[in-house]
Amino acid sequence: MRIYDDIQLDYCDVLLRPKRSRLASRNDVEIQREYDFKWCPRTLKATGIIASNMATTGTFAIAREMQKQHLMCALHKHYSAEELIDFLTKNKAEFSSNELLFISSGVSDADYEKITTVLKTGLVQNVCIDVANGYSPYLIDYVSKVRKAWPDLLIMAGNVVTGDMCEDLILSGADIVKIGIGPGSVCTTRKLTGVGRPQFSTVIECADAAHGVSGTVCADGGCTVPGDICKSFCAGADFVMLGGMLAGHEESGGELCTKHIQTNELDLIDDKTCALKIEEHQYKTFYGMSSAFAQEKHYGGMKKYRASEGKLVELPFRGPLEPTLLSILGGIRSCMTYIGAKRLKDMPKCATFYRVNRQLNTIFGNE
C-alpha cells in the first residue's frame, strides 16, 4: 500500500491570476485552434469543446448546434449504424463536412462491426472509443486494432487519470486521450468504488505526459461553469468535454416533464377567498451512462455482477442551447484578455494560478 502525499486539486481549488495585457478587446483573441495529431494525418480547426457522448448530450440536435459555433460533438453509442449514416449524410450537406463529429464505440465485437459499417461510407473519420475503466487491457487492444484497420482515423480513447496510461494509449494508436474518472455531475464512481482523482491535477499531469509523446488530451467531466473550462484549457487540456453544462436544453436528450409546485405565496381567487399559489415548472431528465436507469434503458437491465455508478436527475428546463454556448465562448474570450493569451493554444503558457480556499461569494446563491 502506498499513499501519494502531493496535494490533488480540483477546478474549485484554484483561480487564474490576471496579468497586464496588450489585448484591448475580447474581439482581439482567436478562440479557434488548428490541431495536429500523432497518428491522424489530417489537421482540425475548431474551438476544442466537445459535447459528451452521453445519451442525453451526444444527440443529433446538439451536434448541429455545436457545429454552428465551430464546436464538436461525440455522438452517443446507442444510435444504430443506419441512424448514424442517415444523419451524417444530411449533416454533410448542411455543414459541408463531418470533421467536427465523432462516432462512439465500446470495445465489443458488435461495436467494431457497427463503426466499420459507418466508417466504410467515408462520411466520418473520427471515433471516440469509450469505456468506464480505461485501465482495462481490452481498451489498449481495441485501440491498436482500430488503428491498424484505419491508419488515418482520428481516434479518441479513455478514460484514464494518470500520465503513464496516457502515454500507453497514445503509443498504441490514440490521438486524443480522454481523461477523468468520477468528476461528472451524474457519476457516482468515486462514491461507490473510492476510485478517482481531482480533475485539475489530472489535467496537469496527463497533458504533460501526452504532449511529451506528441499526443493530446480531452478533459472529460467536472466543469460546472465557463470558468472551469478556462481553467482546464490553462492547465493544458487540448479539448474539454461537457455533459451537465449542455444537459436540460431543448436539443438535449431526456424526457421533458411538467411539475406543479405549491409556493408560500397567496393567490387571490375572489374578494373573500385566497389559496396558496401553484407554479408550473418544466424539467428534463439527465442520467449517467453507468446508472441503473441507463442500464435498463440501453442494455435491458443491470447485470447482477455490476452496480450502478451513476444517477438520474431532473434539471430545470433551460430552453435553446445557443445562449449557453455563447456564454461559454464569451467566458473563454474574457479569460484570454485577463491573462494576455492572444490564441487559445497560448492559454497554458500565459496561465498562473492561485490556490484558494473559496472562489465564489454565494450569499445570494450560486447563479
Image: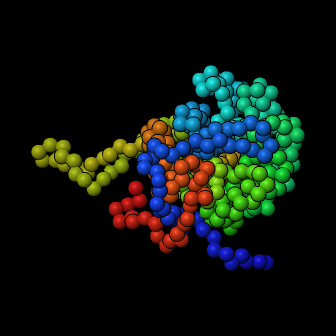
Colouring: rainbow
Is residue 210 found left or right of 264 in the rendered image? right
The answer to which of 17 and 291 lies nearer the viewer is: 17
Is residue 262 found left or right of 335 in the rendered image? left
**For the image shown, how many numbered marks are present on the structure?**
0
Residue 361 x/y as whole percent: 39, 66
The answer to which of 154 and 304 lies nearer the viewer is: 154
Is residue 338 found left or right of 243 in the rendered image? left
Q: Residue furthest left?
A: 271
* Image point (64%, 36%), residue name: 100
Residue 320 x/y as whole percent: 45, 37
Quarter holding the C terminus is bottom left
The answer to which of 310 and 138 lies nearer the viewer is: 138
Check the image and report above or below for 225 versus 77.
below
The answer to which of 37 and 118 lies nearer the viewer is: 37
Check the image and report above or below for 362 versus 66.
below
Q: Residue furthest front?
A: 22
Residue 32 x/y as whole percent: 58, 42
* Image point (58%, 48%), residue name: 344
Corner quadrant of residue 84 = top right
Q: Is residue 278 visible?
A: yes
Residue 293 x/y as whole percent: 62, 48
Corner quadrant of residue 79 = top right
Q: Is residue 328 visible?
A: no
Quarter holding the N terminus is bottom right
* Image point (27%, 48%), residue name: 277
Check the image and report above or below for 279 versus 348.
above
